[in-house]
Every structure is written in C-alpha cells, then in structure tokens.
Image (tube, rainbow, N blue to C red):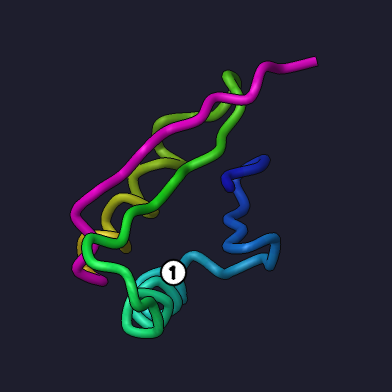
Amino acid sequence: RIEKGSYYINNVKVANANLAQKLYVLKKQSTKDGVEILIHADTAMNYSDLDPLLRAGSQAGIQKFKFAVIPTK
C-alpha cells in the first residue's frame, strides 16, 4: 500500500531503502509460482511515489503487478 508517500507491506511500514529486500524475502518464502504485487493507492498518489515500488519489485524478481485504486474521501 502506498499512503502519503509511505510504503506498507502487509500493513507494516517499510522504508524505501528496504523495499527490494523485503519483497525478495517474501517472494522466496512464497510457495506460489508467479508471485505478484497488488498495489493499493489512492487517486491523489504522485507517480513519483509509485516508481520506487516498481523498481524494488523488479529488483526482487517480481514480474506481475496489479493496481487497486482506493477512492479519496
């Protein structure tokens, strides 16, 4: 989840610098083939906040990304 420029994996805040490592560990722990990232973000999110997550996923070897846009209130 991306919320106000912060990143959360399984509701735990993760520093930008640790995203790739955390995603890599989660991918290795998974028993599923073709691990994917589901990105939750609101409509006010800046694209610049998305880029580090896409790069981290790529560095972790994840090739599938899905997006879920959360409407702003």
**Front residue (pair 58, 5):** 58
- What's the residue at 48%, 65% (across, down)? 16
Q: Quadrant of residue 19?
A: bottom left
Q: Residue 45, position in %: x, y? A: 55, 29
Q: Residue at x 58, y 56 (%)?
A: 7
44 vs 11, nearest the viewer:
11
- Mark 1 nearby-residue class (10 Å; few <14, some 14–19, many ≥20): many
Q: Position of residue 1 (x, y in %)?
A: 58, 47
Decide if residue 3 is on the left or right side of residue 27. right
Q: Is residue 54 magenta?
A: no
Lateral position of residue 58 relative to residue 10, left or right = left
Nearest the eye: 7 or 9: 9
Assign a secondary structure to mark 1: helix
Q: In this image, 41 relative to 12: left or right?
A: left
Residue at point 68%, 67% (across, down)? 12
Which stretch appears magenta? Answer: 60-73
